Image: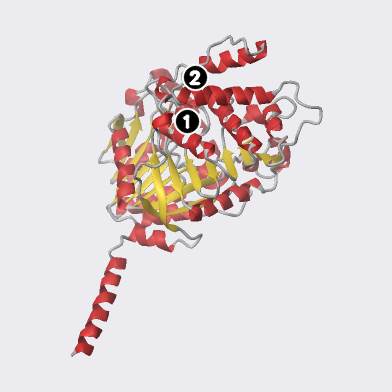
């Protein structure tokens, strides 16, 4: 009898374990089966949809760096944010921290121009523990004019801060005031999304994504200026760092002119002080905590090389997750120029009865009229072909820049990947994929909140198949903007480059 009971217990335990496996949705099962890399089942995650908190997270992880910092960005501006972050990196370089920085030649023109633009970066590489590289400078790929123009336009669109091989920040934000200032202080800033991850396993995946681009062919390495810089860039970087640190920690503004500074120093102090004083919602860093009770969830990094490289772990896996969805696909993306692969995947989802929500920019919130022109060509046909799709256009003066996906409220994706040809086929990209109903619901709820400040675009399909617009971009946008978009719509042959 005891033997029978023992066998029954073993069978019961097996059935319970199988029920746990079968209890996962299809999209969760797919996450577990992705072949490209391992994942960390216990990565600590913080969702960063707010601009100021996202800057504070960067500042804190960089400030606490002890061994290494790897950074890559498409855009790194020479405003108080870009210069203070470079000042932070230089401060850490002096302390012996190993620094590797890469910026894109097209996105970060001001810091990467030969002869007249590289002084700041050349100042930093004076330290032996600092390496700086520029991704795909045009002069290295001129031969592509006779081969494939996309190889010239290809950019490193990755956004990565990786500290001490443990802390990772990635998402849509570049380094500029547009991504970190509160909309309470400047109305036209961006609405974006990042994620903070603490995990050595996930950090290894991100480090590989960083290194494969950092060491790729066509990269231009920044060297020390043989003749020395005409201007002492140390002063600029130190000043930007000190002004930023004092202001965000609640210390207020430095007074100028200061008798302790030279005329040049006072000019720099005035420049950065005048810039930052407008950002009044950024003075509570002292109370900021990197994690505030956030939980741990299964997380993995997926990477994609630019057109010159072989890796693309993102596109097919995103499509497979759309195909695995049973109830809902939510896409929040600033640039919706759907490729054939994306259109086919969303149509399959709609045909299965899956609800698809697309939240994107309207002509009045976008920073890219060309992508809006292509979207203007497409949106009616999308709604006609896919009756379970709903499209919402953002109507606030803030510009949508968030690149987020939510699948069945089980899987959330936060990263750099746009819903366009450029991300699918040309640029390098990186995304964080997180399996958690709690986290995915949190991300979805933020998108629903954004949708409250958006217009829903609607059509009616007539009996003869013709499409009548009930409400669309033209219904709420400035007439002059629509006129420009209608002119740009004629450039539809450029679609593969947008």
Find disc 2 in the rendering and name its residue: 276
In the image, residue 320 lies at what x, y percent?
41, 57
The label nearer to you, 1 versus 2, is 2
The quadrant where residue 271 appears:
top right
Q: Is mark 2 on a helix, strand or loop?
A: helix
Residue 416 seen in this snapshot = no
Residue found 49% across the figure and 25% down from its top: 177
**Which residue occupies the foreground of this view, 261 or 344?**
261
Using residue 103 as the reference point, say whether residue 255 is left or right of it.
left
Using residue 81 as the reference point, say whether residue 434 is left or right of it.
left
Mark 1 Cα shell of 10 Å, populated few (<14), some (14-19), many (≥20): many
Q: Earlier in the sequence, mark 1 or mark 2?
A: 2
The image quadrant where one finds the N terminus is bottom left
Using residue 124 as the reference point, say whether residue 474 is left or right of it.
left
Q: Which colour scheme is used?
A: secondary structure
Q: Is residue 295 above or below residue 122?
A: below
Find disc 1 in the rendering and name its residue: 489
Q: Is mark 1 on a helix, strand or loop?
A: helix
In the image, residue 32 lies at what x, y percent?
40, 62
**Which residue occupies the foreground of this view, 75 or 144?**
75
Q: In this view, does 73 lie above or below 24?
A: above
In the image, residue 354 lies at what x, y percent?
29, 51
Residue 299 seen in this snapshot = yes
Q: Is residue 147 above or below residue 60?
A: below
On residue 196, the disc is: none
- Mark pair 1, 2: CA separation: 39 Å
Residue found 59% across the figure and 45% down from its top: 68
**Which residue occupies the foreground of this view, 182 or 172?**
182
């Amino acid at each position: 009898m005891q033997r029978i009971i023992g066998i029954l217990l073993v069978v019961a335990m097996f059935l319970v374990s199988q029920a746990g496996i079968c209890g996962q949705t299809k999209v969760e099962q797919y996450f577990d089966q992705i072949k490209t890399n391992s994942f960390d089942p216990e990565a600590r995650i913080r969702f960063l949809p707010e601009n100021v908190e996202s800057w504070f997270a960067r500042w804190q992880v960089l400030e606490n760096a002890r061994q290494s910092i790897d950074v890559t960005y498409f855009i790194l501006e020479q405003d108080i944010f870009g210069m203070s972050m470079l000042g932070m990196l230089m401060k850490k370089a002096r302390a012996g921290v190993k620094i590797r920085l890469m910026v894109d030649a097209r996105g970060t023109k001001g810091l990467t121009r030969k002869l007249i633009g590289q002084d700041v970066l050349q100042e930093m590489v004076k330290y032996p523990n600092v390496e700086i590289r520029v991704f795909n400078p045009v002069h290295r790929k001129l031969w592509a004019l006779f081969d494939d123009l996309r190889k010239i336009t290809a950019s490193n669109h990755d956004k990565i801060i990786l500290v001490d091989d443990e802390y990772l920040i990635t998402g849509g934000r570049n380094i500029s005031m547009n991504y970190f200032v509160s909309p309470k202080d400047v109305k036209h800033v961006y609405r974006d999304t990042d994620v903070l991850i603490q995990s050595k396993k996930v950090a290894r995946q991100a480090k590989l994504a960083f290194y494969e681009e950092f060491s790729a062919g066509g990269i231009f390495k920044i060297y020390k200026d043989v003749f020395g810089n005409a201007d002492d860039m140390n002063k600029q970087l130190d000043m930007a760092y000190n002004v930023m640190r004092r202001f965000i920690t609640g210390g207020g503004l430095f007074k100028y002119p200061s008798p302790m500074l030279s005329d040049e120093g006072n000019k720099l102090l005035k420049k950065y002080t005048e810039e930052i004083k407008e950002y009044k919602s950024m003075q509570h860093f002292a109370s900021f905590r990197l994690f505030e009770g956030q939980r741990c969830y299964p997380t993995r990094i997926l990477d994609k090389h630019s057109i010159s490289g072989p890796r693309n772990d993102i596109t097919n896996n995103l499509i497979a997750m759309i195909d695995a969805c049973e109830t809902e696909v939510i896409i929040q993306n600033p640039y919706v120029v759907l490729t054939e692969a994306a259109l086919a995947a969303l149509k399959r989802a709609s045909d299965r009865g899956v609800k698809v929500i697309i939240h994107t920019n309207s002509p009045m919130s976008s920073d890219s009229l060309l992508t809006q022109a292509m979207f203007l060509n497409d949106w009616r046909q999308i709604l006609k072909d896919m009756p379970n799709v709903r499209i919402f256009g953002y109507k606030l003066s803030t510009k949508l820049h968030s690149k987020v996906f939510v699948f069945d409220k089980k899987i959330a994706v936060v990263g750099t990947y746009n819903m366009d040809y450029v991300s699918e086929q040309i640029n390098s990209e990186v995304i964080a994929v997180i399996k958690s109903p709690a986290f995915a619901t949190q991300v979805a709820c933020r998108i629903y909140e954004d949708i409250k400040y958006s217009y829903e675009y609607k059509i009616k399909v007539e009996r003869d198949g013709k499409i009548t617009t009930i409400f669309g971009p033209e219904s709420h946008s400035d007439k002059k903007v629509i006129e420009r978009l209608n002119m740009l719509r004629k450039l539809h042959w450029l679609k593969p480059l947008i």
